[in-house]
Image (tube, helix red, strand yellow):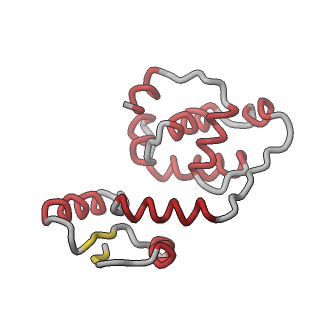
């Protein structure tokens, strides 16, 4: 965790790449700071909304990378195992690795291995791109459990 008055978005990006898990403003209330620390201790990342918006603005100003999908998307989707498809569907709901592991009765490390395979097969650089790919190209058969995770 880092406590700071002000940091440039580029500096924050570098800190996150270096392993920063939390950023709190010196103007935050004590209760909010404690909650942020609790989230970080639970394995989550905490950034104030203003920092998140600044980072998004910086990314939006950059030329976006295009994700090129070659071949037939339906054929590409069939390359995923049933377990990978389940995990992809849960990724589209925004579920964390920990939540996916709990829902599917897997170890969190197993989920990470599946996600790496999913990223490779979907030719995605990160889980967000994989979720976007799944939203476009997987059949919209969302199970009751997947819908429950989204709420």
Residue drawn 27% across the image and 71% down it? 25
Residue 2 in the image, given as x and y percentages of width and height: 31, 76
Location of residue 145 with respect to 126 vertically, above or below: above
Left or right position of 88 against 12: right
Q: From this viewpoint, which residue is outermost toward the right? A: 71
Left or right position of 135 against 14: right
Location of residue 11 with respect to 45 vertically, above or below: below
Residue 113 in the image, given as x and y percentages of width and height: 57, 52
Left or right position of 29 against 75: left
- Which quarter of the image is occupied by the C terminus? top left
Residue 1 in the image, given as x and y percentages of width and height: 31, 73
Along the line of sight, the residue nearer the viewer: 105 or 69: 69
* Residue 102: quarter of image: top left
Residue drawn 62% across the image and 42% down it? 132
Q: From this viewpoint, which residue is outermost toward the left? A: 30
Along the line of sight, the residue nearer the viewer: 137 or 55: 55
Along the line of sight, the residue nearer the viewer: 49 or 74: 49
Residue drawn 74% across the image and 51% down it? 67
Count the labels in the image: 0
* Residue 83: quarter of image: top right
Residue 80 in the image, given as x and y percentages of width and height: 69, 37
Residue drawn 45% across the image and 77% down it? 8
Location of residue 106 with respect to 120 vertically, above or below: above
């Amino acid at each position: 965790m880092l406590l700071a008055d002000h940091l440039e978005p580029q500096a924050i990006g570098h800190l996150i790449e270096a392993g920063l898990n939390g950023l709190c403003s010196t103007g935050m209330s004590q209760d909010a700071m404690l909650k942020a620390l609790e989230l970080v201790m639970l394995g989550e990342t905490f950034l104030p909304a203003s920092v998140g918006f600044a980072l998004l603005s910086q990314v939006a100003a950059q030329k976006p990378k295009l994700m090129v999908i070659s071949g037939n998307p339906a054929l590409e989707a069939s390359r995923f195992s049933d377990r990978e498809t389940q995990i992809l569907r849960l990724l589209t709901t925004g579920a964390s690795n920990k939540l996916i592991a709990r829902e599917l009765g897997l170890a969190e490390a197993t989920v990470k291995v599946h996600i790496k395979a999913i990223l490779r097969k979907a030719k995605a650089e990160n889980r967000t791109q994989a979720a976007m790919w799944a939203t476009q190209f997987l059949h919209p058969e969302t199970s009751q459990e997947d819908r429950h995770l989204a709420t």
